[in-house]
Amino acid sequence: MDDPIKGFRDFYPDEMGPRRAVIDTIEAVSRRYGYREIGTPALEPTQLYIDKSGEEIVEELYSFTDQGGRELALTPELTPTVARMVVAKQQALSKPIKWRSTRPFWRYEEPQQGRFREFYQTNVDCFGSAEPMADAEILALTANSLTALGLDRESFEFRISHRDILGGLLESFDADVDVGGAIRAVDKREKIDLATYYELLEDSGLTTEQASTFDELLAVESLDELLEYAEGDRLRSAITNLQDVFANAEELGVRQYCSLSLDTARGLDYYTGTVFECFDSTGSVSRAVFGGGRYDELIEGYGGQPTPAVGVAFGHATLALLLDNAGVLPDESLQTDYYVLTVGETRAVATEIVQSLRKNGHVVETDIADRSFGSQMGYADSIGAETVIIVGERDLENDEVTIKAMDSGEQTTVPLAAIREDTSPTYDDYA
RNA sequence: UCCGGGUUGGGGUAAUGGCUAUCCUUCAGGCUUGUGGAGCCUGAGACGCGGGUUCGAUUCUCGCACCCGGACCCA
């Protein structure tokens, strides 16, 4: 047997069932918010990612040269592709543009808990509105998706921060401070010791005293409190912007899932406003389950008109961990409505019943392996058949079949004509 | 890329430098020419790959692959 590819997984039916259910739930919720499904290629020019993230990114990609000499990469994320799509039809698309997609991505990384080289994400993005309501809508559909999956306020929380608040604070200390570096330091805060944290802040251009003040301000309980310290328009408007996002989240009924957490930064550079991460409140998943935020400058960066944007990317691997820990991972065992069992030369009648039931929308199986009565019954049991219809020579002599409820084991005979008429026969109907 | 721990039938496991590799489960068939989820019987099915040490390696050793977890990174 050949070894599988590292970090790639097979999904058997009992694993695919839960996964399908999770995807369908999230897609259904975002569809109700008006997010339309898009489809995107698995391959893009490697240059697309180099332009965004620099030459170093290549070693984290599956990249290769195709037979035509093109440098290509398996897509590691959706954002650049979507940005290209928006830019290409910017004039034609009515705003706001609201799109969703669920598909695999690939990154050449070391597998860990909740992280694989091939992984699925549901991306939900909104382009063309800078209003706090757009941020709040993303939060709301995300929260609604999680509660639709069976999670509650005890099992998850959104930690919310704002890039301009962090940036505005930093710039109020010193206009030349390396904002990106300082934000990365903030993002690591919980994982490193305090001395290293301060060292990183000082490397970014803060004095020890400023670093200490900055750290204190990040811990404020409320934005009002922070507003008192705020100097500069940028910082003030960022604070009121985030307050508005919270207020709109309140209106949408999801405020209780959101907490202010200014030390949540997310690692990326392109976020510009609201950023949030979903955490497992029970603490079983140590890293962020997934996250999202506002990225108002990205579309412009790809050559489009200035276009505000906000979105979320559900990572299905970590989400499955969260659902499993909370005990709500869908357990979709095999389910079959009918098994039509044949005994002797009854195939013609049996097939007629089978196809009729299928036409009526039922999941129906019958013998396709020429097996004995006993093993057909065993198979019917193993596939979770609710009802078995036995089409046997003996019954057919009286123009009857036998209908059996598998949960109770009870059975009775039914006239063949009645079965032919009945669109969903059950044992109880004829008992 | 680095660090730690793993790898024995489909799943879960035991033991062993040498005999037919243990047990549970699963699967197939039978006991039962028309009754499954109970029982009994029979059968199928494994030492991750490669090198080294050895008369002999599943066992010791080295390398590789893959798995689990962590670091880095997380777009």
Image (cartoon, helix red, strand yellow):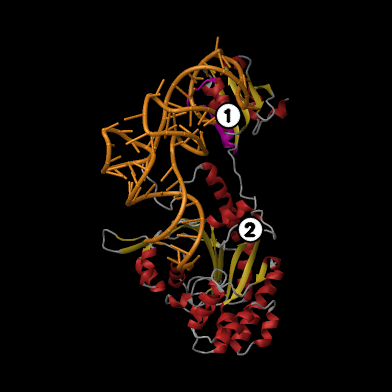
Report which quarter residue A2 is drawn in. Answer: top left
Mark yes or no: residue A283 visible. Answer: yes
In the rendered image, which residue does mark 2 sit on? Answer: A146
Disc nearest the viewer among 2 and 1:
2
Q: Is residue A366 magenta?
A: yes
Segment tinted magenta in the rendering:
A352-372
In the rendered image, which residue does mark 1 sit on? Answer: A380
Residue beneath the point at 55% across and 20% down: A373
Q: Is residue A209 left or right of residue B52?
A: right
Tell me the amino acid under the disc marked 2.
Answer: Leu
Residue in the foreground of this view, choosing between B12 and A304:
B12
Judge whether A421 appears above or below A81 on screen.
above
Residue beneath the point at 49% across and 85% down: A205
- Residue A207 point in image, percent of width and height: 54, 87
The numbered mark, 2 or 1, whose residue comes first in the sequence reads 2
- Residue A341 point in image, percent of width and height: 57, 24
